Structures are given as structure tokens and as C-alpha cells.
Amino acid sequence: MRLDRDRLTWLTYLQLGTYGYFIYGFGPTVSLLRDEQGTSRSVAGLHGTALAVGTLLSALVLGALVRRLGRPTVIRAGMAVMCLGIVTYVATTALPVTLLGVLVGAFGGSFVVVLSAPVLSDHHAGSGPSAIAEGNAVAAGVGTVAPLVVGACVGLGVGWRPALLLLVPVVALLALAGRGEPPTQAAQPTHPLQHRGRLPARFWISWVVVTAGIAVEFCLVLWTADVLRERMGLTPGPAAAGVTALVAGMCAGRLAGGRLALRWSVDTLLYGAILTAASGFAVLWLTESALIGVPALVVCGLGIALFYPLGVARAIEASDGRPDQASARTGVGAALAAGGGSFVLAAVADQVGIHLALLLVPALLLVAAVGVRAGSRRALQVV
């Protein structure tokens, strides 16, 4: 089996890259914005909740928009709305406005990330899981740059806001590039049953795996900068840039996962990803040295890299021919994970400190492992 990349494939990868820059650039700005607003972690964590609400609202309307407008139009509109959210987020330090900006950005960005999976799955058939993993590797690769740019802007004294605003002209160029995409290419649902009937139990077990994995990702993306500052003694600029280690690991993991998905089963790769993430987290949690903690973040990233792309591919495969419906439902899970996981961690951290609060991560990894086992075809046949 091989993966043939054409114009639609690369366009989808680059569109995913815009979301990767937004989400991984947003993560390290939460701590910096908290300094400006003078709020607690729980209040700052509301930005993760706003991200979740935007993602959830996107999932609720996505199906109707795709049926009416087609995937390419909805993706381009999503990128434009994401940019509107970024501009709103950076416009002021007023909490209601920054929360609104995150909500709007997540609402638009979710169109891009959720629809990319069925686009690549339909377009590449049996190589779909590999294409989804590779596309998310591109997103993580682009996202690797974002914390570095945030840290560099802070170090130069211009603040973190210009780093996020750099995305706006890039999105404009991609929107122009995508206008020539034929509407028949992944524009309309190709599976006649995908909008009718209930999704099977195996899908919902896969949904739990994806949701737990995304919760781990967002807990670390949003609060790693705090860990580097408070436990390992880094200053705000280097701490923000340090998130790059996590995202770089994710990029490498997804690139490797795209290749491995052509040879190994999704379940086998997910087990490996969980073990890798758990190993990296154990080192991160035990050390107080940035020289050890930053490489441990790379290992964490290698593991969590595959939770979303392969989890979504697994959910789509288990959806009985309803890829758009399955992707929309995983979008709801992503919303719950992004808002619920990161906010719970922040609230607990306000009470017991960020170090103890991070123990939420191995608990979520255990949930994911149980879900992979419960959702395997062999386990279901035994039941």
C-alpha cells in the first residue's frame, strides 16, 4: 500500500497547518496573558473552556453546512473565521473579549481540522489513516514554529500578539490557492448512510479513546509553559518557546506514524503511543531540571502525536460509512477534552499546585488504553 499525494492532499495538509499554528501558538500565550490580566489559573483556564465551546458549536452546525455548501467552501470559511478570532483575541486584555476571541477562533478552526479527516479518508481510501497522520504531522510541524515565534517576540520586547497575527496573511494566500479546487473533490458526502441512523457502539468506544487523548494533548499544550516556569525555573520567554519541544515531538511522531500506519494496525500503534507518552510524562513529572524536562516533553509529544489522527481514523472506520458524522462527533469529544481536561487541571492546580495536578495526565492515558482494548474487534467478538 502506498500514499499518493496530489494537489488536494497538499492543500488539505497546508490548511491543517494553519490550525496547527493557531492552536500551538495559542497554548503558550495563555500563561503570558494571565500575567497581563492578573488572574488565577482557573480564570486563565476559561480560555480552554472557550476553546471547547467554540469547538462544540462548530460540531453542532458542521453537518448542515457541509450538506449545503460542500467541504471546500466550509473549510475556507472556517479559516477566515479563525483569523477573525485571532484578531479579537489579541485586540485587548479585557477578559470577556479574549474569551470571545478564542471561542470564535476555535469555531472556525474546528471546521478545518474536523473536515480534513473525511476529506483525506475519502480521497485516499485504504491509505486514509496514513494520510490523516501525515496531515496532522504537517499541522504539528507548522505548530512547532508558533511557540518559537511567540518566545522570540517576547524576547524582542514586542509582546506575543504579533506572533499570532502572522497567520492572517498566510490564510489569505491559502484561501486563494484553494479556490480552484473542483467541487466534486471531497465536496459532498460520498457515503449515502452517513447522515442516517445511530453510530455503532464500537464508534463510541473509539470516541472515548480520541477524547481522552485530546485531553492529554491540551493539558500539556496549555500548561507546559507554567511547568517550565514554576518547577524548572525558566523565564516567560524561554518557557513559552519550550512548548516547541512538545510540538516537535508531535510532528516527528505523526510523520513516523504516517509511515507505520501503512504496515501496522491502528490499535497496535495506539498502544505504543500510550506507552511512549506515559514514559515521557513520568520523566517530566519527576524532574526539576529543564535539561531533562525539555527532552521528556519531546518524548511526550512522540506519544500523544498519534492520539488524534489515528483515533479519528479508527472512529471513522467504526462509523459504518458515516465519516462526516463520525468526524463531527469526535469534534464534540475534542471540545469536551480541550475545555474539560485543561480547566479541571487548572482548577486543581490552584488548590494543590501544577505538579500534583498533572497526575490527571496518566489517569487519562489509562482511560485511553482501556478504550483501545475494549473497542478492538477481538474484544467485541468475545463479548
Image (tube, grey):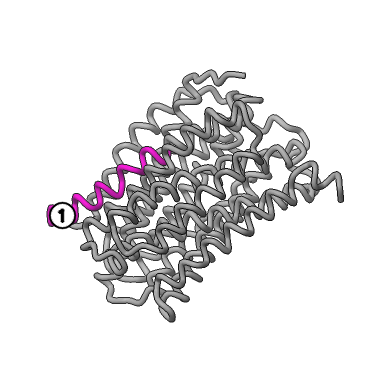
Question: What residue is drawn where x is 26% and y is 44%?
Answer: 166
The span picked out in magenta is 139-158
361 or 181: nearer the eye? Answer: 361
Question: What residue is drawn where x is 30% and y is 69%?
Answer: 230
Instruction: Specify whether residue 67 is in view.
Output: no
In this image, 114 relative to 101: left or right?
right
In this image, 238 relative to 138: left or right?
left
Place of residue 379 in the rendered image (x, y in percent of width and height, measured from the top left): 80, 47
Place of residue 296 in the rendered image (x, y in percent of width and height, measured from the top left): 39, 52
Residue 105, placed above or below residue 78: below
Residue 113, placed above or below residue 284: above
Q: Residue furthest bottom?
A: 351
Main SS of the magenta segment? Answer: helix
Q: Locate the N terminus by quadrant.
A: top right
Of the residues shown, which amino acid type is indicated by label 1? Gly
Q: Which residue in the protein does label 1 denote?
A: 155
Marks counted in the figure total: 1
Residue 87, placed above or below residue 266: below
Q: Quadrant of residue 211?
A: bottom right
Q: Is 283 inside the magenta-drawn segment?
A: no
Question: What residue is drawn where x is 41% and y is 41%?
Answer: 140
